[in-house]
Image (spheres, rainbow, N blue to C red):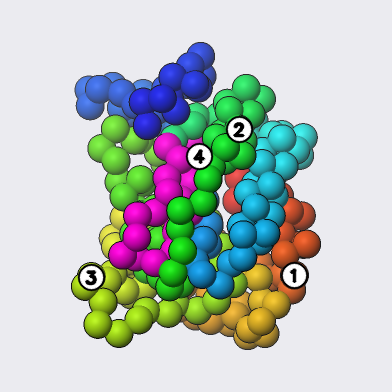
Amino acid sequence: MRKAFLLAAGVLAVMTAPSSQSQSCVDTALVLAVDGSGSITDEEYEFQKAAIVSAFRDGSVLSAIRSSGSVAVAAVFWGDGELSSQKIGWFVMDGITPSEQFALEVERNQRTAWGNTDIGGGLWVALDLLSDPKLCARRLIVDISGDGRETIAPKRRKSISLNQARGRAEEMGVTINGLVISDEEADLADYYDKSVIMGPNKFVMDIRKFEDFARAIRLKLIRELS
């Protein structure tokens, strides 16, 4: 995390001493929670990464970031809850340079997430990032993408359910938005609408093929930051 903030030097700091947090709060803290479970092929995983990288180099997204004030962005690549999720720490953005640094971090990410579609576990890691005591933000958002329902294998050693994660998000005042790839489950958007997304101004976007992911994530970011 310290590395991420050093890379974003020169922009508004989000890591402050408790006595000065109120003066340096960002307007929005956003975690991109990206599906890296076994249902995602290596090609699809790289496609998601490339789409995020492209979005944070897109002029319309950069304009939305600038117009929305200060924005802190982090990412989680999640899969099976018994495996470690990959995390990219906070980058504070109000211009092109920190956006490019975040894009480079995503681009360099090497996949280690696999296994079950553990949506609850992925959300929990995103909420851990949002609950960092050094983070101060007026609006908290998790932007979760996936291509399936939560699947948890029997006899798991440990498991955080989707309901547990949503309960924690409600207590924290977090909005959860969804981006579903429903190429194999036609009603996946309905599942996300009823069982995943929550909070003020929540919404879910539905695409039918991974080729549409880049456009969807760009539009989704603009909508969330507007």
**Residue 33 pos. (x, y %):** 49, 55
Give the alpha-carbon distance from disc 1 to disc 3, as whole Å. 32 Å
Give the alpha-carbon distance from disc 2 to disc 4, as whole Å. 13 Å
| Type of amino acid under label 4 | Val
- For the stretch drawn in magenta, the main secondary structure is strand
**Residue 36 pos. (x, y %):** 51, 61
- The residue carrying mark 2 is 104
| Type of amino acid under label 2 | Leu
- Foreground residue among 99 and 225: 99
Q: Quadrant of residue 151?
A: bottom left
Give the alpha-carbon distance from disc 1 to disc 2, as whole Å. 25 Å
Pick whichever of labels 4 and 3 is earlier in the sequence. Answer: 4
Q: Quadrant of residue 103?
A: top right
Look at the image and tell me whether residue 27 can be seen.
Answer: no
- The residue carrying mark 1 is 209
Q: Quadrant of residue 211?
A: bottom right
Q: Which mark is residue 158?
A: 3
- Answer few, some or many: residues within 10 Å of disc 1's Cα (few below 14, many 20 plus, some between 14 and 19): few
Q: Residue at x 67, y 59 (%)?
A: 43
In the displayed structure, does residue 210 sit left or right of residue 22?
A: right
Q: Nearer the viewer, mark 1 or mark 4?
A: 1
